[in-house]
Image (cartoon, rainbow, N blue to C red):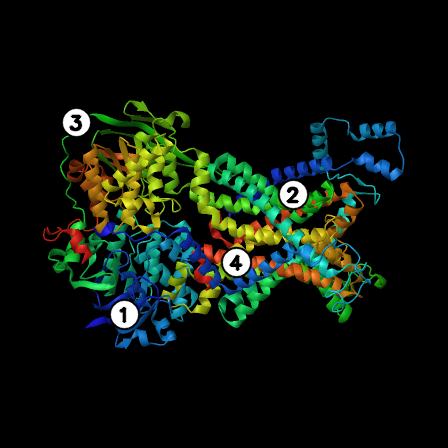
Amino acid sequence: MSGRLALILRRLVQAIPILLAIIVINFLLLKLAPGDAVDVLAGEAGSATPEYMAELRTKFGLDQPLPVQLVQYVGRVLVGDFGFSFRHEMPVVDLVMNRLGPTLILMVTTLSIAVGVGILLGLLAATGLNTWRDTLISVLALVSYATPLFWVGLMFIVVFSINLGWFPSSGMETVTAFHVGLTWARVLDVGHHLVLPALTLSLFYLALYTRLMRASMLEQANMDYVTTARAKGVSERRITFRHVLRNALLPVVTMAGVQVSSLIGGSVVVETVFGWPGLGQLAFESLFARDLNLLMGIFFVSAVLVLAVNLIVDILYTLLDPRIDMQ
Amino acid sequence: MSLVDIRGLHVSLPEGADRPYAVENLSLSIAAGEIVCVVGESGSGKSISARAMMGLLPEPKVRATAGEIVFEGKDLLQMPRPDRRALAGEQLSMIFQEPMTALNPLMSVGRQIEEVLIVHTTLGPAERRARVITLLEEVHLPDPPRIIASYPHELSGGQRQRAMIAMALIMDPKLLVADEPTTALDVTTQAQILKLIRDLQDRHGTGVMFITHDFGVVAEIAHKIVVMQHGRTVEAGPADEILSQPQEPYTRALIRAIPSLTPKPRRASNERRVLTVGGLEKTYRSRAMLGKAQSVAAAKDVAFTLNRGETIGVVGESGSGKSTVAKMLVRLLAPDAGQIDLDGIDIALLSRRQLLAHRSKIQMVFQDPYASLNPRRKVGDIIAEGPITRGQPAAKARARTQELLGLVGLKPEAADRFPHEFSGGQRQRIGLARALAMEPEVLVADEPVSALDVSVQAQVLDLLTEIRDRLGLSVVFITHDLRVAAQVCDTIVVMSKGEIVEHGDVAEVFANPQHSYTRELLASIPGRDWVIPTLEDLPMNVALNQ
Amino acid sequence: MSDIAQHDAPPSFGARSLAFWRLFTRNRSAVFGLAILGAVLVMSAIAPLLYPGDPFALAGRPMSPPGGEWIFGTDTLGRDIAAGIVHGARTSLLIGLIATLVAVLFGTLMGALAGYYGGWMDEILMRVTEVFQTIPSFVFAILLVAIMSPSIQSIIIAIAVVSWPPLARLVRGEFLSMRNREFVQANVLMGMPDWKIIIVQILPNCLSPIIVAASLLVATAILIESALSFLGLGDPNVMSWGFQVGAGRSVLRRAWWICTFPGIAILLTVLAINLVGEGLNDALNPRLRERSG
């Protein structure tokens, strides 16, 4: 138990330099971008005299040497100050926090579908090795694995929204319903809107976990401990579920953590296609508004999200693998 | 009456294998309370026979195609799967070579033993637990409740194998199949496990099919012996007969290849020191950011000397620090402190750059014939690249390579081939040639024959001694095998937990061990009481080719 | 002596290539993938012959349905979709290959240094890799392209920057296990310089997994490129599949074909590369061959 706690603490401590590095990268990207905040401000205002701009630069500390600016920037980020979005006329933090909820809903749903169904399909394919079941699952996984997300989204809209009319093609809620508070009707409405984006986003990862689970099951099935179990007279069914399954899950869990960062990237595309009002869509909007402060804020928050999910995955892993105590 | 009768068993290999049958026409019988040892070198089909008995062949690629295995009047090969499964673990059970991988790493040991009861009995949880505890006591595991809750990685190798034995014997089976159960263990643990198996089978009247490559182990426990080679039975009979008067040339050759435990007397020495090691220290520390840092002393104040032309043996069990010492001698590892005086120059603490000029004087022969040669380089390049790196002209290095290949008993054409075209013994010869190409004064041989079959082992050892004498080499010979040490070494150091516990002439140490650990090691050598018969008839290579 | 019986002729390079080809072609889906990939390659090579002129040029009536004068129809401005697909193949393959090459070179370098030297070098390089793996890769790519302004070069750099970490980890793992192989220790004892051990001795032994990973990276790179241009971050002067899909998005209800056909082109190409990659894996990695058979 103490080993587990120590491990979690260690992971937390290890996350600190990563977080700092990401802030530094953030800062460097801001500096690399053509123009600074003052240029943007001046652009917004329409016209500004060079004297006024110089004054603003002093005010924002932009005339300081780079290292000083970096330290100031790190300090600001650490207290949650990502600057001001001139486009939205709101602090970046508030904007990002408003949009975090929908993205979390989409991510959690997607990850649950992808991991849960992926494990199930991988199990089905591995236990029916080289039968039609295995072939079908493997082919489907292969095709899903090669399909661009945005295209699947559009095709789903063509089929399920435009032609069949089963699901709405955009948004998170029916605007005309004027939901207030958390009611069942609202939950159902959001769920109804969630189906297509969640399916779209999960398809690729579903394929990934299916393939991984299948390969992992097949690898574990060749292990010596399976032979031991057979020598004990344990049935194949029991071997699969009591011995192989848990061992096979370990690489899948690891991979689930690794894939979270790419999942967030995928949500940019999917939220854009389905008009899902999350961080991804906000990122897309700020990209074209050249609202760099906002973009950097989103970038940072999504990196923190990845770190958080990875921590959860690590904790999950220690529950699955007793050997972690020793390491 | 016999418990099991194997008659005319054929196990076929998939098409394209180097021979049609893994096991050909095997017949043997095991009576209750009898230990039958199936002995053979790698590829003899001994393990496949064990798996066929347990119904664990990797079917359909490898399957029994003819013959029968009659157990209590019924042919196991004809039995429907569910019936056979009901017998497995209940009437017939098995223990394996590597208890670490044979146990499920994610399931507690107690649960894995209990599973046998869950599958084969209707006992309730409390009764099952009681049975498991009884069995763990019977295999002499300390503190059974703690063992039950432990996971495999929390136990030592010997404890894991005891747990495996408990698992195999919990249903009090009539037959136990043991596939090299002590090969992965240290010699002292091996002795304990062998004793345990013998005691338990004697008490319960269990029949045992014991697979091994080691005639010493055979001498310890066998009632009957079956010698196998290339899937065929070479010789079978009562243990006493085969151990004292083997008839078949192959058996005789195998037995003759076993190194004798009687050391050769120390050869006359010229008393010129070539290597003086003193105060050598190495501590491994595991860094931990939180929690306590652990440190293991792999070498503590190691000191010994080596005279020119002599061989010093460094013996010990796994974790004794002998490999760490070997790596420090050739400076693959930097010592924390101490000196390694190599012909007047202390290389212990030299920097990498300073070391460059002295590297060639001390070279190494490695243990693993498969990992020690780069699979992507031709043998000629492997041998010549050392001298070329030192600045020798390529043409000269190539010519020297041809000579060296001849010296280690390989044809010159070998230079143009890749390592995978050679057998394990041949690869060790190539590794030796590579070390010799550097023209070293001291050769550090790290378990150079422990991965080889006994017949090949004898050939490589002979070659090593012959070359040592011809070139006047001094050798540091690392080994866990006291029989081998007795045959090749002049002096010996015994290591335990990073420290040298005994140091002296081999003959003296073997005849009159001073330290209790040395005495335990010597007492644990399997087959130490067996007087190996002197067999002088056929030259070994002729016999082995028959 | 039995121990030193020797085999006959060593296999020549030609014989080994033939053996590899046999193994590869045993996997039927890999052959299928290779055929599609070959077709895409030919298509991109002869694009100027098939559809001479600018693929951005207006060919006819906007939003003509497929099957008529234009097999895949025309888009909102009247550009020939088929011409766009053929020219887009060049963009996808070019970006996919070059970005992968850059990522593989950099990832291999990082992984080799970390795995070979271990210790603090490993610690630092792997921390850096971890940072790059934590950053949501696609978001990072968007940012990079946006900051550098969209062009073929910036897209290639962005894809390479987000693609190297998995490769670095793979190569590090291979080097870590090779580092303690006895043949490498023997090379150290010879006094061989580190760079020579890394490049001449270890690297050739790690090529198979690198080749397989690289082939899969090409597929991923093509997917990233298409998503970037779908979002409007493609090089505005070059036709690409993602751009075509993005251009048809607003008229999805009226003209489904504008999005559909370029999407199928992406799907088929990526599928083909994945199949070839798996075929390579099976042929180069004998340990896995058993399973897939």
Contact? badges 3 and 1 (CB < 8 Å): no
Is disc 3 in contact with disc 2, using a CB cutoff of under 8 Å?
no
- Few, some or many C-alpha atoms within 10 Å of disc 4 (few <14, some 14-19, many ≥20)? many
* Mark 4 and mark 2: Cα distance apart in space: 26 Å
Q: Nearer the viewer, mark 3 or mark 2?
A: 2
Say which amino acid is labelled 4: Glu
Q: Which residue position holds label 1?
A: B10
Mark 2 to mark 1 CA distance (whole Å): 62 Å
> For the point 49% across and 53% down, which residue is it?
A321
Residues flagged by tags 2 and 1 on a common chain: no
Give the residue type at disc 1: His
Residues under numbered marks 4 and 2 in contact, where contact means CB atoms less than 8 Å apart: no
Q: Is B181 placed above or below B373 here?
A: below
Which mark, residue B270?
3
Which chain letter goes with mark 3? Answer: B
The residue where tag 2 is placed is C157
| Chain of the residue under the numbered disc 1 shown in the image | B
